[in-house]
């Protein structure tokens, strides 16, 4: 993975930059010592690291505006950062950039139960949005597995999803408005506490734009009343393909569970060792959850179990109480942590039509043998959002490169079967160079033209999303104009 070389003329401005940032921010909000900058050298795609020139921790939209204006004047790139849990390298700095972290911007600004909306500063963590309203019977639906740590800002930038997004949709379906600061410091309001906005759907553009268009500082989010009840059923199968076929049949039948999660043997074993959730000894496991009144749950689960029985499950375990439901979810929710304890891994994120699940799972296991690298699968199967975790050893020379090649082949396969390169983790640097497999030159040009409008100097979150050869002329023109 290649990043552009840092520009000496930018590095030479470090002292001026720090002096000017200190004029608009408290002293402890400007970080520039080498040792402290190590904390910002990578996100959760930790195979790639590079400390930034400085990091800033603003507390308000106004401070963000001051920071961006200064960086814009000096021609210094800015990398927005939430909690740094991106698995696509979205928050990876370059050596000549400033990290703008929104972690201190975590306040709840307004809660409006009558209209079922909440307004928060964008650094608030995902889970603490629900935390702010759950006592009153509400919740915020998108639930990435990283929800304890990840920030709403990162969720918006990556259009994040989670286990329960099959029913409730991903971030874009639960976001109503944002306050955003453009690279030149201009503050704009997009959307609001209402269903739709007049004019272009700019909110749809911002959500999923990976920090390319502006820095989101505040967000208005939809909150929902908690469902009357929910119940998961755990299904064990003796092959990945059969479990995949079962998912496909559930979706085809038109039942709408809130979640259908898939785990294969390597992942089940790691989770079992880690979380002791009591999972059965099997090749593949599905967790299917439905919501509603007791009668609705019984009816939906009855149909789902009927479909599962057609695939000869080794076990169907329906949660009898909240405790058993918690245990069923425990292993799945700890999956990434559990895998991290046993191996280095790279977590991929491709989306495919649900009907292609059996074929794609089979191909992944064949490729795993060809590459000689293990793979564990854990993913949101109901919406076809796959997360193969490729296992490698970071200390073995050549293993990372082999892992990258294997990952690229899996993502190309996702595109081949009619899916796409990313479901919820974003493109970042990880899939940047694969974008040519998904898009023609004219498609890429249309996307880059949007960035030209919001960030004509191409200073925001450099070297992400667009292949370097696609953006080369624009970046060179912007530098020449500095
Ligand atoms: C264990 C684990 C489990 C995960 N599970 C899921 C999952 O189930 N579903 C899922 O979707 N993702 C998942 N992720 C990926 C990750 O948590 C999400 O992408 C998350 O939304 C990133 O949020 P963050 O605050 O950490 O953002 P960061 O990693 O800090 O940044 C992510 C991107 O957002 C941009 N950004 C951050 N703040 C701003 C801002 N204020 N304005 C503009 N751009 C900004 C950054 O530049 C970067 O491109 C998981 C990650 C881990 C480590």
Image: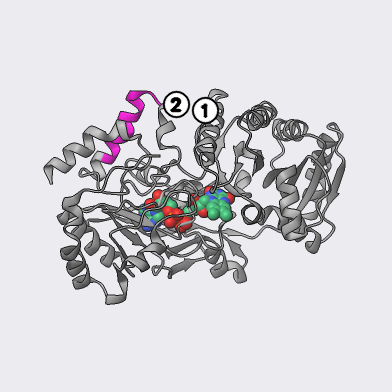
Give the camera-side residue of 73 and 258.
73
State if disc 1 and disc 2 touch (CB < 8 Å). yes
Residue 65 bears which disc, if any?
Answer: none
Query: Does the residue tagged 2 have its C-beta within 8 Å of any atom of ligand 1?
Result: no
Q: Is mark 2 on a helix, strand or loop?
A: helix
Q: Where is residue 106 in the image (x, y as percent from the top left)?
A: 43, 68
* Relative height, residue 230 to residue 347 (above, below): below
The residue that mark 1 highlights is: 412
Q: Distance between the residues labelled 2 and 1?
A: 7 Å
Which structural element holds mark 1?
Answer: helix
Q: Does the magenta stretch include residue 396?
A: no
**Residue 187 in view in this figure:** yes
Q: Position of residue 401 (x, y in %)?
A: 49, 37
Quick check: can you spot residue 194?
no
Residue 104: x and y in percent read 39, 70
The residue carrying mark 2 is 437
Q: Which region is colored magenta?
A: 439-451
- Seen in the picture, residue 69 relative to 440 is either above or below; the reply is below
Counting residues from the start of the chain, the first of labels 2 and 1 encountered is 1
Q: Residue at x 70, y 47 (%)?
A: 267
Residue found farthest to the front? 397
Q: Main secondary structure of the magenta part?
A: helix
């Amino acid at each position: 993975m290649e990043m552009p070389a840092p520009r000496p003329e930018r590095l030479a401005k470090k002292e001026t930059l720090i002096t000017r940032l200190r004029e608009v921010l408290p002293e402890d909000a400007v970080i520039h010592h080498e040792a402290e900058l190590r904390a910002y050298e990578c996100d959760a795609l930790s195979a790639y690291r590079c400390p930034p020139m400085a990091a800033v921790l603003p507390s308000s939209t106004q401070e963000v505006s001051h920071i961006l204006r200064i960086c814009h004047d000096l021609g210094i790139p800015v990398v927005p950062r939430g909690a740094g849990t991106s698995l696509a390298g979205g928050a990876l700095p370059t050596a000549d950039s400033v990290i703008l972290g929104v972690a201190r911007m975590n306040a709840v600004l307004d809660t409006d139960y009558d209209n079922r909306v909440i307004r928060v500063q964008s650094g608030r963590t995902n889970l603490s949005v629900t935390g702010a309203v759950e006592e009153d019977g509400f919740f915020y639906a998108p639930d990435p597995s990283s929800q304890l740590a990840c920030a709403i800002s990162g969720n918006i930038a990556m259009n994040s999803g989670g286990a329960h997004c099959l029913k409730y949709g991903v971030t874009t379906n639960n976001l109503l408005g944002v306050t955003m600061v453009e690279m030149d410091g201009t503050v704009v309001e997009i959307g609001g506490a209402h269903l739709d906005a007049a004019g272009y759907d700019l909110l749809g553009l911002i959500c999923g734009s990976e920090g390319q268009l502006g820095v989101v500082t505040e967000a208005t989010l939809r909150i929902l009343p908690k469902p009357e009840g929910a119940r998961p059923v755990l299904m064990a199968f003796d092959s990945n393909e059969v479990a995949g076929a079962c998912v496909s049949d559930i979706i085809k039948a038109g039942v709408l569970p809130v979640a259908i999660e898939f785990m294969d043997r390597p992942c089940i074993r790691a989770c079992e060792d880690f979380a002791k959730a009591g999972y059965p000894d099997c090749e593949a496991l599905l967790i299917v959850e439905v919501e509603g009144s007791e009668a609705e749950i019984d009816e939906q689960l009855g149909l789902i179990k009927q479909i599962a029985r057609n695939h000869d499950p080794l076990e169907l375990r329906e949660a009898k109480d909240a405790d058993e439901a918690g245990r069923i979810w425990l292993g799945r929710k700890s999956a990434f942590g559990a895998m991290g304890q046993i191996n280095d891994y790279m977590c991929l994120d491709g989306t495919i039509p649900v009907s292609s699940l059996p074929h794609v799972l089979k191909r992944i296991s064949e490729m795993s043998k060809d590459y000689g690298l293990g793979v564990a699968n854990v993913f949101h199967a109901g919406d076809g959002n796959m997360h193969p975790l490729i296992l490698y050893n970071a200390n073995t020379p050549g293993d990372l490169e082999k892992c990258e090649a294997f990952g690229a082949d899996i993502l190309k396969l996702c595109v081949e079967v009619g899916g796409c390169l990313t479901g919820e983790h974003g493109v970042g640097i990880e899939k940047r160079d694969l974008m040519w497999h998904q898009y023609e030159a004219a498609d890429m040009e249309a996307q880059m033209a949007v960035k030209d409008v919001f960030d004509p100097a191409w200073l925001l979150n450099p070297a992400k999303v667009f292949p370097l050869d696609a953006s080369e002329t624009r970046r060179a023109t912007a530098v020449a104009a500095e």
